[in-house]
Image (cartoon, rainbow, N blue to C red):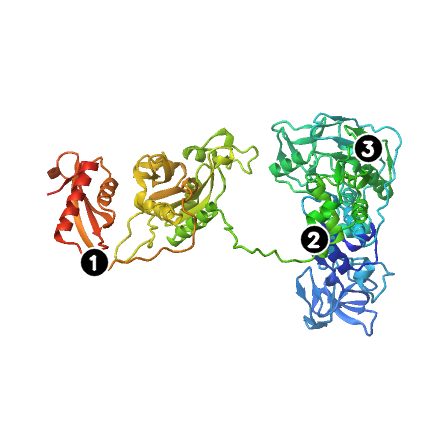
Amino acid sequence: MKLTLSWLKDHLETDADLSTICERLTMIGLEVEDVDDRASLKPFTIARVIEAGRHPDADKLQVLKVDTGQGEPLQVVCGAPNARAGLVGVLARPGSYIPGLDTTIGKGNIRGVESFGMMCSERELELSDEHEGIIDLPEDAPVGQSYAEWAGLADPVIEINLTPNRPDCTGVSGIARDLAASGLGTLKTPPVPSIVGEGACPTGLTIEASDLCPGFALRLVRGVRNGASPDWMQRRLNAIGLRPINALVDITNYVTFDRGRPLHVFDAAKVKGDLTVRRAKDGEAVEALDERTYELNDGICVIADENGVESIAGVMGGEASGCDETTTDVLIESALWDPANIARTGRDLGIITDARYRFERGVDPTFMEPGLDLATQFVTDICGGTPSEKIIAGYEEPERRQIAFPPSEVKRLTGIDISKDESLSILSRLGFDRMDDGDGTARISVPNWRPDIDGKADLVEEVIRIHGVDEIEPAPLPAHGAVGGPILTPLQNRTRAAKRALAARGMMEAVTWSFIPADHAKLFGGGDQRLKLANPIAADMSDMRPSLLPGLLAAAGRNAKRGYGDVALFEVSGTYEDDTPKGQRRVAGGVRTGSAHMDGFGRHWSGALAPVGVFDAKSDALAVLEAIGAPVDKLMIMQGAPDWYHPGRSGTLRLGPKTVLASFGEFHPRVLDALDVSGPVCGFEVFVDALPAPKKKATRTKPKLELSPFQAVSRDFAFIVDKTVPAGEIVKATAAADRGLISDVRVFDVFEGASLGEDKKSIAVAVTIQPLQRTLTDEDFETLSSTIIANVAKQTGGILRG
C-alpha cells in the first residue's frame, strides 16, 4: 500500500514530520517498508531559454543560452525539436543524477561545443513516457525555483507492508484513522454527501448469483466530458505507481486508494439492455481491460448484458464497455462481492488487480452506497454531467458483531496495566462502540470495516498496539530450581537422528511437495477420495502423498534430465494414509540412482562402479533404524515389500512378524516408466513412528566401554540348504548358537550348482568369535562349532557342506 504525505494529510490534521509519522506507523502495526523522499528531483530547477541557435556542426542540435535565475546564463546543447527562445523548462546542472537515464551528467563537449547542463524531458525525470521534447512550462513559472516544489512533486511517498488482516488500511483514510487513534493528530476525513440524482436510472439490474454478490449499487451520469484528470490527481496516482488514463478511470482508481472502495465505470452507450449479475457459463470468454481474453467457468461471477459478459466481477472490467474520450454517459458501479470467490477467480485466471486485492480481504459493506456517491461527486466536479437516481439491489444492512470485553484481559494477556477508561477510549477512537454491562465487562460493537476482529483477544491486540508495544518492559524468563526436562519429543529426536544418519551416508536432503498427482498416488498405494484436495494449487497436485518416494523419484528424474544421473536424495517428513490425525505418519525415505553408492559414484580409473541395488537401500534403512534406536540385531528381514518395488529384489525389516519398521528394494520397472525415470534406482522408507518407545528412560550417559583382552578368532562354515531358505535365516541361526561368544556373522559366498543337488544352494558365512573370560581351547571351538551346525540344521534344515 502506497500513499503520499500530502494525501495522508487530507485525512489527518497533524504537525508531525515524515520520520515521526513513519515511526508511528510501524509502532502501531503498519510497518513502513520504504520511504521515497523524492530527493532525486531536488537538483532540477526551472530555467528560461534566452537564445536558441543552430549547432555549427549538427543539423538536429541547437545551442541554447539558459537563464537559471542565478548569475550568468549557461550554455546548453539540446536536441529537442521543441527547444526555442522563450521556452521555460527544467534544467539539470552538471553533477545531477538523471533517473530516467540512470546516469549522472557532467560538463560535456558535443561536437566541439561545450554544454553546461541538460534540458530535461518528462521521461528523463520518470514523470511519464513522454520523450518527444523537453518539458514546456507556463511562462509565469518562477525561474530559479526548484521544479519539484513548484510542480508539487516533492511529496514523499510512503510504502506500507500491509498484513492481510487489515483491509481497513487499504485506503488512506483507514491509515489516517489509526494514526489519529494513536494520538498523532486529528482525523478529518470529510463526510460523503448523499446525492439523490434526477430521474430513474434507465439501465435495470438483476442479481441472479446472490450468494456471490450481497449488494450492488448503480447509477447513470449523463453528459460527461471524459478528458484528462486534474494535475493533482495525476500526480498522486503517478506517485503510487498508477498510470493516469482518463478522468473517469482515474476517479475510480483514486477512490480505491483513498477510501479502500473499488469501483467500476461502464460506457453506457456500449451497454445493451439491463445488467445481470450471474455465474459465468462454461466456455464463455471476455476480453478484459488488459487486452487479454479470459475463458470463464461457472465458478466465476460476472456482470453481463444482452451482448454477453461485460466485466469479471470484482476483478477486472471488460474492454467492450470501457470508457474512453468518446464517453458521454457513464454507469458507475459500487458492489459487494464474496471474498473467497474473488480470491479463487483471481487465482484461477491469473489476474492481480487493486480491486481483487481489496475485495478478497473484505471491504466495508456499509460504504457501498457512500462510495457510489463519492465517485458521483468526483465525476460531476471533474467531468460535469447530471446524475440519475441510484439503484440499490440485494443489500441488507449488516449487523455489527458484539464482543464481551473485560478490560482486565489486557493485563492478563500482555502484562501491561492499562486502565479501563484508557482501553475503552482507544477502542472508541478506532471506531468501536461500547456499552457497559455493569459488572465490569464492556460490550464492544465492532465496526463493519474490521472483519478481522473476532474475539476479546483481538480487542486486547488493538489496545496494546495503539497504547504502544514499546511500553512492554523486557523481562528474563523465570529461572527454574530443578533441571529442565527434555525439550524435544522422542519423535522429534528420532527425526533429527534420521536426518543426520542419512546425511552422513552422503545423501542430500530434499524437500518435496506434500501433494502429488493422482496417478502417482495410486502407484504408491494412495488414491483414497478422503485424501483428495478440494482446492488444489495445480491440477497435477491433487492428492496428499501416501509415500515420500514419488516426490523423491520425480526429483531424481529432473536431475537426470539435467545431466546428473548419479544422485542420492532423502527426506524425513509426513505421509498420509487417511484424513485422521493417526493417518499421518513420520517417514524417512531415500532413493539412490546410477552409481551413487555411499563411498562415491561415477567413473574411476580402476574400473566403473557397479550400479546401485537392493543392498544399498537395505544398508540405508538399517543405518536409519540404528540411529533412531531400533534393536537392529533383533530385526527380521522378510519378503513382502509393497508392489512398487521389484518383487525379487526387495524386502521389509520387521520387529516381530507384524511390526513393519522399513521397506526397501529396487523399484518396479512399470513404476519407473510411469514416473519417466530410468534405472537403476533403489530406495527405502523407514517408518519412524512405528518404532515402540524405549522401555528405559532416555539418558545421555554413555555405557561403560568394555574391551576384551583376548584375541578374536574367525571360523568359516558352508551350509547346503534349499533355494527357498533366505541367507538371513542362516545368519540368525548361527548367531543364536552362543550370543556371548559370537560377535559377528557375515555371508561371504553363495553358490549353486548341479553338484549340490536339485533346488539346493550353498551359503558360506564367516563367524567372528570373541572370548571375554579366557582363551578358548580346541575343545571349546569344537563344542561351539557343533552347536552352530546343530542350530542351523534345526532352524533351516541346512547341512554342513563337505
Q: Residue at x 60, y 29 (%)?
A: 283
* Mark 3 residue element: strand
Q: Residue at x 89, y 31 (%)?
A: 198
Q: Is residue 785 above or below residue 278?
A: below
Q: Nearer the viewer, residue 572 or 407?
A: 407
In the rendered structure, which amino acid carries the disc numbered 2? Answer: Glu
Location of the C terminus (image quadrant): top left
- Identify the residue position indicated by label 1 in the image: 711
- Identify the residue position indicated by label 3 in the image: 219
On the image, the x and y values in percent for residue 726 come to 24, 38
Q: Nearer the viewer, residue 464 or 784?
A: 784
Q: CA distance from mark 1 to mark 2?
A: 72 Å
Q: Is residue 656 visible?
A: yes
* Mark 2 residue element: loop
Q: CA distance from mark 3 to mark 2?
A: 38 Å
In the rendered structure, which amino acid carries the disc numbered 1? Answer: Gln
In the rendered structure, which amino acid carries the disc numbered 3? Answer: Arg
Dot 3 crowding, Cα within 10 Å, few <14, some 14–19, many 20+: many
Dot 1 crowding, Cα within 10 Å, few <14, some 14–19, many 20+: few
